[in-house]
Structure formats: C-alpha cells, structure tokens
Amino acid sequence: MRDRLRFLLLLIVAAVVSTLLHELGHCVFYWVQGIPAAMSLTKEYPLTDITASQYAIGSAGGPLFSIAVVVLAVWLFRKRRVAGALRDFLSALILTGVFYFVLRSLIALLKGRGGELESAASLLDLDYRAAIVAFLAVIVVSLYLWIRAGGPSFSLKHAGYFVVLLIGYVIFVVALQSLDQSLFWARFPSVEIGDGRIYNAHPS
C-alpha cells in the first residue's frame, strides 16, 4: 500500500511535468514561426493575431512534445543503468502520457471534433481521427516496449489500481486547469485566428 501511494504521488508530479512540457511544445512551435507566445500551467497563448495555418502548427507542438516525452521515457526505462526512483518516475511519465492521449481521444470522439488534434491533422489534410489513430499507435507500441522491459503487468488483478491512478490523474488535471483558469487565463490577451475564431476569449 505504501508503495502504491508513493507511485500515486509520483504520478501527480509526472502529470505536472508532462503538462508543462506539452504547453512548452505549443510555444516552441509558435516561436519557430516567429510568433511571440507564452504559457501558463495548462494553456499556451499566442500573443498576436495569427493565421489558421500558424495556429495549426502551434497546435501540433503540444501533442508532438507529449509523444516525445513518452518515447524518451520508454527509451530511458529500457536502459539497464536506470533504476530506483528514476525508473519509477519514468513509469509515471509514461502512464501520464497514456492517460492524456486516451482521454483526449475519447473526448474528441464523443464531441465529434478533435480540438488541437484536429488542427494538427489539418496540416496534412487529414481528419482528426487519423491523428488519433497515429498517436494511439505510438502509445500502444510504447506500452508494449515498456511492459517487455519490466514495466507493470496489466492483469485483471491490478486493474483496480490502474483505475484509481486514472481517476487520480483526471481529478488532479481538472483541479490544476481550474486553478490555472482562475489565476492566469485572463492575464493573457484574446487573439484572432485567421478563420475568424477567437482564442482565449475573455468573458464580457
């Protein structure tokens, strides 16, 4: 029980790290276009009006950084010299990436629109469902390599614990976004995307 609580805490830390890196990915993809951008805890902000294609490129940065984090974590996990707390933290990073993409994909399918995944897919003239399939394929392969390298066994015996981890992740991320929204979102400007959308619209 003690080890499981410890891992839950590691998962929360990993959720913060992976979320910040996700937002950083958005910013980096704006910066390389010469667009000023900033970030808060759970959101990125282009600081000037942008075109739809510039927004799509910026949108792609977050998911791509999240995928890169999972792939890098799996690669490091498979290194024999990695052990102890670092190995557990890498496992937590992998799980947060898996949870993020599974939840993001389910929400997109339920809503019938993909959000940032849809914008990213539009760069290749693809439907957002194609982006979901591509990202989930990377996640499945990463999970397979992680488990083969000594990661946890996803058996029915442990199913309840992984459900608890997923619920804990969702509660924490929702709380973090709520805190972020109340503290920071209004501090950044609303900007217009070339197709007429308003990003980071402030309530009147």
Image (spheres, helix red, strand yellow):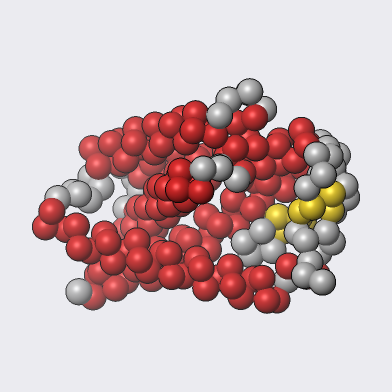
Q: Quadrant of the N terminus?
A: bottom left
Q: Relative to the observer, which residue lies in front, 195 or 11?
A: 195
**In front: 90, or 135?**
135
Q: Quadrant of residue 29?
A: top right
Provide residue 97's location: percent of width, then percent of height.
44, 49
- Residue displayed at 59% across by 50% down: 22
Numbered-mark total = 0
Relative to 25, 11 lies left or right: left
Q: Position of residue 125 (x, y in %)?
A: 63, 23
Which residue is most to the top?
125
Q: Residue furthest left?
A: 157
Residue 78 visible in the current orientation = no
Does residue 170 lie above or below 153 as drawn? below
Residue 99 appears anywhere in the view: yes
- Residue 163, percent from left and from top: 27, 61
Q: Residue furthest right?
A: 48
Q: Residue at x 34, y 57 (%)?
A: 88
Question: Which residue does the image show at 25% across and 42% down from the upper left?
Answer: 147
**Rendered-image quadrant of the C terminus:** bottom right
Q: Residue at x 23, y 75 (%)?
A: 2
The spot of residue 94 in percent (x, y) is: 39, 49
